[in-house]
Image (cartoon, coloured by chain):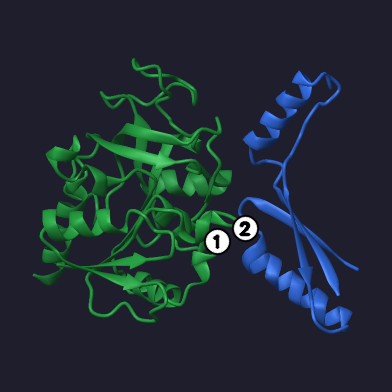
Chain colours: A blue, B green
Amino acid sequence: MKAKVYVTLKTEVLDPQGDAVRRALHALGHDDVKKVRVGKLVEIDLDGDDRAKAETELQEMCAKLLANPVIEDFRFELE
Amino acid sequence: MRVAVIQFPGSNADWDALHAARDVAKADARYVFHKESELGETDAVIVPGGFSFGDYLRPGAIAGYSPIVPALKRFAERGGPILGICNGFQILAEIGLLPGALTRNAHLRFECRDVHLRVEGRGPFTDTLAEGSVIRVPIAHADGRFHCDAETLETLEKNGRIAFRYCHPDGRLPESPTERGTDGLPINPNGSIADIAGIYDERGNVLGMMPHPERASESILGSADGLGLFESLGAHLRKGAA
């Protein structure tokens, strides 16, 4: 099974990288860009075909390591 | 005093910490590799600076699951003094020994220069430093912007757990997060909330700080102000033994 984990900064956490990208997009002429937030995509290949077990595991992986709950939110998709 | 310096793959201030503790502060200091599961006999622990595991995922995230970490947590729970410097602070925050998180510097630059810190919170590493006094120590980080929620900040303020704040050379705090000093550089080098440079944990024995006191521990390095933290630790341990 393949999983995609998306990790993003919480809305209240300043994202200087996103701001820098926004300014660069403005420099390219994309004046309609209002806000940019940069996050992470983690792709995971999992053995087995038990979706429920995989979802439980992914939840634990995100909460313990892939995201820092103090500053980040996460969600995942299982193919 | 006996000091253990934890070594992770990618630590780069481990030698600096060992040198300051052993050769300058005259402690019985040694390394403990991150794959060990026990700290051994020690009175204090330093989690040094660097880029453990290449800062992959987030600074300190992967080091947080090293085999030595449970022993570090037990030592903290027993009231053992722990000093996390730079990446060490990031690791201590990741494993929950300290609240909040260290995020990307607000202006995105890697800052490598001396800063001034106002000494505030009381604890094993600051007790002999006068409250309100100013020390000059270097920083070297890209992810030093301390972030926490409003409730946590209030708790830190109320309980005197903010050990150090970035300040002007005379101890004044910047009036805005972007205020610059006479050298043209921001007083608060990373945009940390409330100008926070270092905090103590709830019990008061774990200190995390982004600046490097071990790199300012003797005058040949340009400042010996950082030695005060080691002297304070020594005094704290002697008091405990008496």
Q: What residue type is labelled 2?
A: Asn
Would you say A62 lies left or right of A77 here? left
Q: Which residue corresponds to the image point at 79% horizontal and 21% vertical from the top-left?
A: A28
Would you say B86 lies left or right of B43 here? right
Residue hosting label 1: B61
Q: Is mark 2 on a helix, strand or loop?
A: loop
Label 2 marks a residue whose chain is: A
Q: Which residue corresponds to the image point at 38% horizontal and 79% vertical from the top-left?
A: B36
Quarter occupied by the C terminus of chain B: bottom left
Query: What is the crowding at mark 1: few (fewer than 14 residues within 10 Å), some, or many (at least 20)?
Result: many
Would you say B119 lies left or right of A21 here? left
Does residue B99 lie above or below B106 as drawn?
A: below
Q: Is mark 1 on a helix, strand or loop?
A: loop
Cα gap from disc 1 to disc 2, whole angstroms: 8 Å
- Determine which of the numbered discs, if any, sits on residue A68 in the image: 2
The reply to whether the C-beta atoms of the residues labelled 1 and 2 are less than 8 Å apart is yes
Picture coordinates of residue B168, whole percent (x, y) = 32, 24
